[in-house]
Amino acid sequence: MNQFTSSVPIYDFAILGAGVAGLSAARILSPSLKGVVIDSEEQAGGLAWQLGCKATDRCLYCGVCHGIQLRRDLGNFSSYPFDFILGQQLSSMFKENGNYHLLFKSGRSIITHLILIATGILPFDARQVPQYGYGTFPHIYTGIEIERNLNSEGIKTFNAYQKIAFIQCIGSRNFKEKRGYCSRVCCRYALRIAEDLAFQYPHLQIDMYYMDLQLLGGNKELLAEISEKRVRLIRHMPYRVESPNGKPILLFEDDQKVNRVEYDAVILSVGMTPNPGTKQVADILRVNIDDDGFIKDYGDGIASQENIYVCGAASGAKDIETAISDGKKVAQRILSVHQYLQQGIS
């Protein structure tokens, strides 16, 4: 007899990750299957629930409202027939009789027939590129930091600024550091933040330094309009930020000449990286990851082990709306397979 007893909870599905993709999948699966949503954090919602609405006098279609609506729909989670295990970190797994036995570091354990990985993404830590001065010089922010404070008193400091700059692709599209992928969201969220700041503070001059703008997904016309009317686009990538007098100075080369431009503030548009928990989960479940560190999706959310799936940004950087849609799509796929197997049994 193994260490598990009949008192161990048994589920049809377990979702690893309580972000918007995992919760969206749980809503689809739970009416038909008994399930549990697991997260190492103490609170559900993931990155999406930490972000602020960027609407001005019009909606900028940032996708945050989709996460907000999901939270409203779930309420206190008591109205949906799936369990939560929060603040628990997975430590090991073994498979027996077609079921996965999951053991947590606390000693708690569950049994599940199916696993859906939805571990999501995290913003790149700008301190890993010290040449841009984040955490060292004043008046240097990350885009995520600004976004989290758009609707708070903290953003009022921008009223004193006259001239600010965005630097794109911080922590992504860098093959030397093995982060060659495009995060797919940075250009869009930077343009929306720029629009919001320009709306709040019309006096601001906003420059954006970039390689090339990736207006992926929908609402390209809106983003193109912002880039033309609100932002001065500068197709150069600064290689360093200095701050000899308390104001950031951007250094970049143009025609083999070093240019130095002073600003009141600099916003680093950080890319998205796999959640550190993704690698840990992949090792424990013995599923493959791709060259960028995301769970490898072999189509329809299928991972490299039987009855293990992946959805949302766990398989690659996605915006909020796309992550929610992917969670729903993979959940529908799982239900279709389950219904087919049930028909075969009957």
Image (spheres, rainbow, N blue to C red):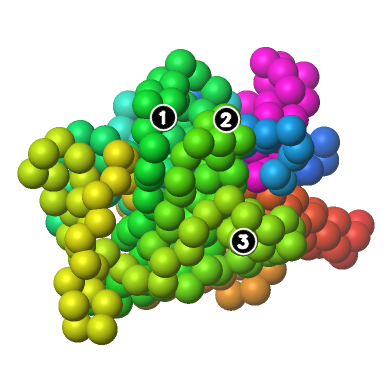
- Identified at 31% across, 33% down, the residue is 105
Q: Name the element at disc 3.
A: helix
Residue behind mark 3: 228
Residue behind mark 2: 200
As rendered, which of 297 and 82 lies closer to the eye? 297
Q: Residue furthest left?
A: 244
Amino acid of disc 3: Glu
Q: Earlier in the sequence, mark 1 or mark 3?
A: 1
As rendered, which of 289 and 238 lies closer to the eye? 238
In the image, is residue 225 above or below residue 58? below
How many labels sit on residues?
3
Q: Position of residue 82 (x, y in %)?
A: 68, 29
Taking the image as shown, residue 28 lies to the left or right of residue 153, namely right
Question: For the C terminus, which image quadrant?
Answer: bottom right
Pointers 2 and 1 in contact (C-beta within 8 Å)? yes
Q: Name the element at disc 1.
A: helix
- Identified at 42% across, 44% down, the residue is 143
Q: Which residues are magenta?
A: 62-83
Q: Is residue 117 visible?
A: no
Q: Name the element at disc 2.
A: helix
Residue behind mark 1: 158
Amino acid of disc 1: Phe
